[in-house]
Amino acid sequence: MRILAAMMKHETNSFSPVLTDMARFEAWGLHRDAAAIAAYRGTAMPVSAYFDLADAHGAEIICPVIAEAMPSGYVQEETYEQLCEWILAPLRAGGIDAVFLDLHGAMTAEHVADGEGELLRRIREIALDLPVAVTLDMHTNCTAEMVANADAIIGYKTYPHVDMYDVGRQIGAILWDKIEGRADPVMAWGAAPILAQTLCMGTADEPMKSLQQATRREEDLPGLLAATVLGGFPMVDVPHAGLSVITVADGDMALAEAARDRLLAQAWEAREGLIYRPRGLRASIESARAVNKAPAILLDHADNVGSGGTSDVMTVIEAVLAAGLDRVAMATVCDAEAARAMHAAGAGAEITIGLGGKTEMPSLGLIGRPLRLTGRVLKVTDGRWTVEGPMYTGVEVETGPTAVFETGGIKIVVTSRHHEPWDAGILTNNGIDPAACSYILLKSRIHYRAGFQPIQPDLGVHFTLDGEGVTTSNNNILTYRNLRRPIYPLDPVDQIAFP
């Protein structure tokens, strides 16, 4: 057999000013053909599970592309079309027996609102009866078109996403059972009118903890092959943004629909817990100062690269400096200009720079505001390292020319490329011992827990700092024009007919 395994992933933030072109994919990791297999074999990614299953079945792997970009603005039309074409070309050539895709589920291009649904539709247009399996991110905005054009779909059950390989293995095995006549997967899908906040979707927290436990209970039922609660991604202005559920049963649609309905009902009952309530920045910093258990984790979540942030908003950093917090490690500020200046000055040099604030955010009416700082360059690196933690294990990271800048009791990792600090390697590979810090300030939401919770396992010592940026956790300050309405919490519950 010849199977096509490919990855095309992007979480689109329609409020982000960050350009999503082919260079954006190349910056994170764009691999073709044999190089793609070599780069991702043995990693903790879904596509690696597909490779292992193909090997176990003696199948030949065709991997035309593995492409992922850090979340950002709309994917350019030319870029989207090229990524799709790389996947579709082997299908047109013929001789492919099955398709295994590692997708995100919240990709929107300049000309296509549902990037994944359109790709799957085009696959079916070429090969109507070809078996297709798909893994999706937990923050998928799922559509009927995705479900109609695949045989078996599953999403991650963990956030941080430490089960990516496992769900790839699970859904891949289901498709192999279909190919070999042992199963007849059928899917039920439904959406709830909830625009949940990603900051409230951590699977160590309620209510997502109980919702994902419920999916596992459903999967214990005879004949129920997979069950997924998709929290959705709220920072994209498309009609289908929001929470949904997909279930897969072995030939029994009624079983799949009953499981789906139970999970949707549970999600609706838990809706209040899926919405973040903003807090005062100064009060949150003082709460962190009052905790006598180092290191305290501080989260600049409104400027999170992992949701499309610019990673150069200095509001929270300025507040932390003004508060006089000491022994702070901060990751990361993306400022290629500042990184170049630090490399030119060299380790040990004292310099004055305007750090960050290089990007304007028209969707929020925010202008770039660099923070003028004087400090010392502690270290310069090429920004290349390999993830050793439980999420993206084995994947190579390239943050470009990178430096550590120390000023006023804070050590700031300054990168030339966008990077969400979900792994402690962003500090340790730049000469900072996170365990020796009093505070760790991260431009992250939940993913940081994969690499940093082992350093500070007490979630009571983790604090959200409400700054500014296009990954705000306050949906009310975003202007939606295409989102389906009514939807909670933007509209009163008494205006919503559900279930």
Image: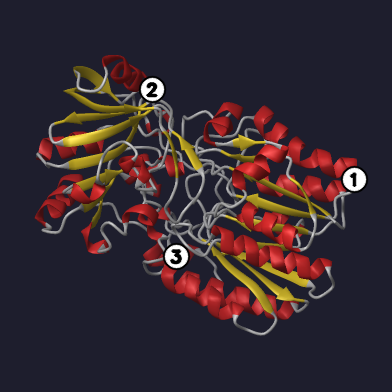
Q: Which residue is mark 3?
A: 493
Q: Is residue 463 left or right of residue 219?
A: left
Q: Amino acid at mark 2?
A: Ala
Rounded to the nearest angstrom, the CA distance separating label 3 from label 2 is 46 Å
Q: Position of residue 426 (x, y in %)?
A: 36, 41
Please tell me in which quadrant of the rendered image residue 294 appears: bottom left
Q: Mark 1 and mark 2 in contact (Cβ < 8 Å)?
A: no
| Residue at 34% over, 56% down | 276
| Residue at 45% over, 46% down | 387
| Residue at 24% over, 23% down | 347
Q: Which residue is mark 1?
A: 94
Q: Amino acid at mark 3?
A: Val
> Which of labels 3 and 2 is toward the front?
2
Q: Nearer the viewer, residue 255 or 428?
A: 428
Q: Amino acid at mark 1?
A: Gly
- Residue at disc 3, secondary structure: helix
Q: Position of residue 16 (x, y in %)?
A: 46, 34
Rounded to the nearest angstrom, the CA distance separating label 3 from label 1 is 51 Å
Categorize mark 3 by other alpha carbons within 10 Å: few (<14), some (14-19), many (20+): few
Is residue 397 positioned above or below 268 on the image? above
- Residue at disc 2, secondary structure: helix
